[in-house]
Amino acid sequence: MSQLITADLVDVDLFADTKEAAARSLAERMAAAGRVTDLEAFLADVAAREAQMPTGLDGGIGIPHCRSAHVTEPTLAFGRSADGIDFGAPDGPADLIFLIAAPAGADDDHLTILSALARRLADSTFTEALRAERDPARAAALIRGETPPEAGADADTEEPGEQPDTAPAGSGPAPFRIVAVTSCPTGIAHTYMAAEALQRAGEEEGVDLRVETQGSAGFRRIDPAVVAAADAVILAHDVEVREKARFAGKPVVDVGVKAAINRPAALIAEAREKAAQAGAGATAEAAPKAPDTAGRAPMDEGAEGDGFGTRLRTWLMTGVSYMVPFVAAGGLLIALAFALGGYKIGDAPSVAEHFAWGEAASWAALMFQTGQAAFGFLVPVLAGFVAYGMADRPGLVPGFVGGAIAVTIDAGFLGGLVAGLLAGAVVAAIQRLTIPPVLRGIMPVVVIPLVSSAVVGFLMFVVVGGPIASFQKAMTDWLGGLSGTNAVLLGVLLGLMMCFDLGGPVNKVAYAFAVGGLATPTDGSLKVMAAVMAAGMVPPLGMALATTVRARLFGKAERENGKAAWVLGASFISEGAIPFAAADPLRVIPSAMAGGAVTGALSMAFGATLRAPHGGLFVVPLIGNALLYVVAIAAGTFVTASLVVLLKSRRTVEPAPAASATPAGEPVSA
């Protein structure tokens, strides 16, 4: 490969009054060098990228860039404008313009050039030397990071961003320690420029400063030991800092990313001042420096001391939480389609081929087929976001691929869970590799998606997919054949789970199990869905009934919550009972679980079925054996209310005089 930039790609007297003219002038040099095959088509690609977001940076810098099928190899052209050209930077025109061209699909080259250049631009010595240099060959050498011919004073041969992670060694006391996070919306230019500026300022100030860059390529977390030993934190960001809770209790300087580029020394001074005010500087434990393990994979993250079970639950709940909106949209559309067009609407022809505006059947078919399309995403979304919970954004591609394979081989909901866990684990393993900072942009764009998708595909198609699909089929057949005692016992179990934590992880597991069955509906899976929704309605309805029949056992706030709980319960929002459970968990939760178990058992015994994943009493017309279904919900509600009243009555009678006529105060937590 040729050098990235050569003398004939440098114009130290760029005459252009617009960014389009500047791009054309530099692109013509690329075309003359044989690096651009179609000038006009390449300029169209540059303009399309520029239209997405301005490429001007503070400090008089413009970096127009694109990937194009008309580029033969990664190329950088440089021009210097005497009058300045507007590239959309807030601080005014740019006099240093860098046109970056990469071949189509070469995301690794594109990101590598951008991130490396962004780091160098944070060095004022570098930009000042470029502004002063008159010789194109020496300017090209400066940009390549080489010593310019016949002059070495202006060049910095060390690649910016490659400074050692620790402050210069010394025999004095331990240096002041700072951890910093930089992030910008695109995660390339400003992110790395801010990181570079902070690192250089830290070296100049004698501060042990570690930087974590967060952006479009995900992020590599600073070692928790380094965070724990830090005296202060600098957050320089234009997007939300991920895992911000890690820095709780530390003095924090919170600014935009450009502040770190423009005044890094001032931010360090502010961090020192805040640490001094908090006493952190004087009391920080003089722990030995831990090695910088920024390559730690996101799946290792979490509060210190979190066990694998806790992290596993978090990963699974991440997947479920992203899946639920698809469930609600798709399921309710399907339910409405059945209500409008009957249960045979699934046999209707594609609405793309036949749709009559005035026919109700066509509208029903439209809703059914749209709902089916939404349901088609359930397993891939579940798998993709389980992997996301483990490995951040790089986990999305292999997660979605694994989930799609699970659908293809009929591995279903369980296959999606396994695919997501495999994808997250594979990505996390790749992220453990030690990668030079300048190459970090390559990994999530090309290497991680390619390798992880291939590995997950192999595992799902060849190794684990078959057994999971067989187990899924066996479970589906078992559900379809449930009757009598077995069905009732399953209803009891599902009812207990739905009411145990009122919308928490256990509740979500039972709900996700039921929803997974709707993707391939059978009589058994429809009964499970009905039992799960019925049981989930019981806790808020039971508490609403209890506050109505024995109001004196509840405080004013709880009585008000009881009124809202009628609507929440009828809408299948189990969280409506949380205020009561939080105030008196040892009485409310067992009562709710008892009522949920009764409702789940009766729903299964009555053979009630449900095709809608949500809606509560508002989808009763879509329920099989609807009257008995309502009886099951009423029975569980009565059990929950009765137990709560009984338990609270025993509590209030013991400490209070029996003749008291005043209402009880706020319940005392057990």
Image (cartoon, rainbow, N blue to C red):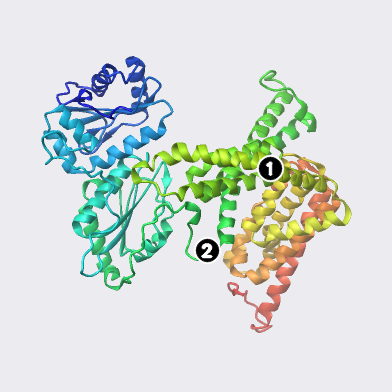
Q: Are discs 1 and 2 less than 8 Å apart at CB? A: no
| Figure quadrant of residue 100 | top left
Q: Position of residue 545 (x, y in %)?
A: 71, 61
Closest to the observer: 474 or 629? 474
Q: Position of residue 558 (x, y in %)?
A: 60, 65
Question: Which one is earlier in the sequence, the residue at label 1 or at label 2?
Answer: 2
Closest to the observer: 493 or 466? 466
Q: Amino acid at mark 2?
A: Asp
Q: Which mark is residue 276?
A: none
* Label 2, residues with CA under 10 Å away: few <14, some 14-19, many ≥20: few
Residue 348 to residue 434: above or below: above
Which residue bears the numbered disc 1?
A: 465
| Figure quadrant of residue 49 | top left
Q: Residue at x 69, y 63 (%)?
A: 548
Q: Quadrant of the N terminus?
A: top left
Q: Farthest residue toward the right?
A: 484
In this rendering, does residue 637 appear at all? no
* Label 1, residues with CA under 10 Å away: few <14, some 14-19, many ≥20: many
Q: Secondary structure at mark 2?
A: loop
Which residue bears the numbered disc 2?
A: 306
Total numbered badges shown on the rendered structure: 2
**C-alpha separation, residue under disc 1 versus residue under disc 2:** 30 Å
User: Does residue 380 appear left or right of residue 232 in this picture?
Assistant: right
Q: Amino acid at mark 1?
A: Gly
Q: Quadrant of the C terminus?
A: bottom right
Closest to the observer: 159 or 364? 159
Mark 1 vs mark 2: in front? 1
Q: Position of residue 581 (x, y in %)?
A: 62, 65
Q: Secondary structure at mark 1?
A: helix
